Amino acid sequence: MIQLEHVHFAYPAQGPSVQDVSFHIRKGEFVALLGANGAGKTTTVRLIDGLIRPTAGRVLIHGMDTATTSVSQRARMVGFLFQNPDRQICKNTVREEILFGLKATRGEEDESRLQARTEEILADFSFTGDEEPFSLSRGQRQRVALASVLAIEPEILILDEPTTGLDYLECCHIMDHIRRMNEEKQVTVVMVCHDMEVVLDYAQRALVMAGGKLLADGPVREIFRNNPVMELASILPPQIIGLGQRLGGAFAEEDSPAGMAGAILAAAGKGGKRDE
Amino acid sequence: MNDLFRYVPGNSVIHRLNPVTKLLLTIVICAAAFITDRIWYLGILLAIDLGIGFTAGVAKRTMSIFKGLLKIAAFLFLLQALLSRKGTPIFWIITDQGLLTAGKVVLRLIVVCMPLALVLAVTPINDLTNSLVQVLHVPYSYAFTLSTAIRFIPQFLEEMSGIMEAQTARGVAFDQARGLKKFSMILPLCAPLLISSVRRSDQTAVAAEVRGFRLRTRESGYKRFPFTALDAGAAAVCAVVLVGAIML
């Protein structure tokens, strides 16, 4: 569905941002792009959407080269949720906002159908539709932006740090909705995220980047257990992974229940020390 | 475009001038452009603009500003040449006087705009603010407003480009539209830009307040801006340019 072949990209007057990145994402996958700031994650997702074009290599969406089609034409297929929802929102009510995105991508369809779809998505997100987007909270505005993106029923959903600045509950609202779309409608999700707990909870596969290069690609839990890669990418895996690793190691050395109990206490103690 | 208002570090004669002198030079060139009615004198003023840019070692920026202004100038020239009815027709509805007036209008535009952009390329914005406060006794709040407005321009441009990118990603065909159609697409985006600008201004105001904005006076600045022999020379050039515009 998404294929990057030896992609290179450099912003003008800057060093290379992405170097020789190649990967393939299949339909229905939930992929997280991990790495420190400046690793090239946002550049990679912008390359996938075609907002920027590679200086070398190819980006293919459904076999179509992004260099040969325009971003607005692809918008029907690829939805992009930006970190800052205020860049997406431009209408006075949530209803108008959702309808605006629908008209931009599905303008050829009957108006009544688009309105029906708007009402459907409003109900889905528990909006009345008359709310003024700019007077909503940051989390609510992010939900409006997500509703607007999901209204067009994209096959691919790109999320650039979707949970930044959101509290736990707002983060769950957003991510649960995305997971539902991924599971029920097989929407392919590519997410840039700095919250490793969110990555562990929602993503199936992780791509780790550092210095513009792809360091590792694999199932999330395996990637988190790969300490050398985590260190190279300056990522601290979720605590539960570290605890699990310590317990697993301790259990392998102990046979008796008393020994295992001791190992649990020792692992918990180590975890506590690490937190300090 | 974003780099158009950014400071270019350097140690040229122009860089070393007092910021107030640079402002004076800018104002004098602008005034001379409006005073003179001679097209050749406007040409001299344009040469002075270009000379300042090249002497300051910002030739690339100077040419970039010049080329940008040429595009607007070409449109204005055409409009002026088509609308002016004075003089003898030389081709279709275009008259000799119309061409001359159009030439003066566009030269004036370029001559006036170039030093305004160049002064920001050769003066750090903080030096400009502080010199206005220390030397010209401008209240700090006014100088701060001016410098903040200038500093915000690249940020607004970046924000607008981000908004357009986000809208393109959701299907608004900015990447395919041209001219008036593109303009009509941009118009609804003024709302998010305005809202983000107001938010940003509000945040800046709060940040300034918590850092003791109101305690700042003319004496607060550490750096001093004395006038040197270079400034005297620049003042002499200003006098010549102004007298030339009035007399010739």
Image: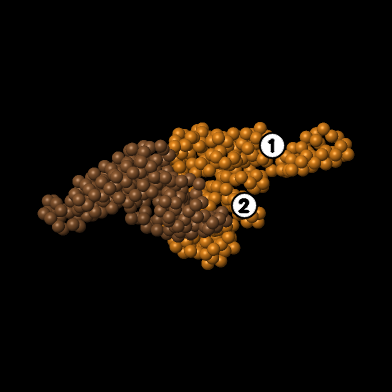
Please give the chain letter of the residue carrying mark 1.
A
Instruction: Please report, as a chain letter, where disc 2 is located.
Output: A
Q: Position of residue A180 (x, y in %)?
A: 61, 53
Q: Where is residue A174 in the image (x, y as percent from the top left)?
A: 60, 54
Q: Mark 1 points at which residue?
A: A225
* Residue A231 falls in image quadrant: top right
Asked whether A14 or B171 is in front, the reply is: A14
Query: Which residue is the site of mark 2?
Result: A175
Identify the mark at residue A91; answer none if there is no mark: none
* Residue B214 visible in the snapshot: yes
Q: Foreground residue, B172 or A85?
A: A85
Tell me which amino acid carries mark 1. Answer: Arg
Between residues B236 and B177, which one lies in front from this camera angle? B236
Chain A, chosen colour in render: orange
Name the side, left or right, on which A95 lies relative to B136: right
**CA gap, disc 1 and disc 2:** 23 Å
Identified at 88% across, 39% down, the residue is A258
Q: Is mark 2 on a helix, strand or loop?
A: helix
- Left or right of A151 in this view: B64: left
Q: Is residue A16 above or below residue A45?
A: above
Q: State the residue in front, A50 or B161.
A: B161
**In this rendering, does residue A85 appear at all?**
no
Q: How crowded is mark 1: few (under 14 residues within 10 Å), some or many (20 or more)?
A: some
Q: Is mark 1 on a helix, strand or loop?
A: helix
Q: Which chain is the one coloured brown? A: B
Pointers 1 and 2 in contact (CB under 8 A)?
A: no
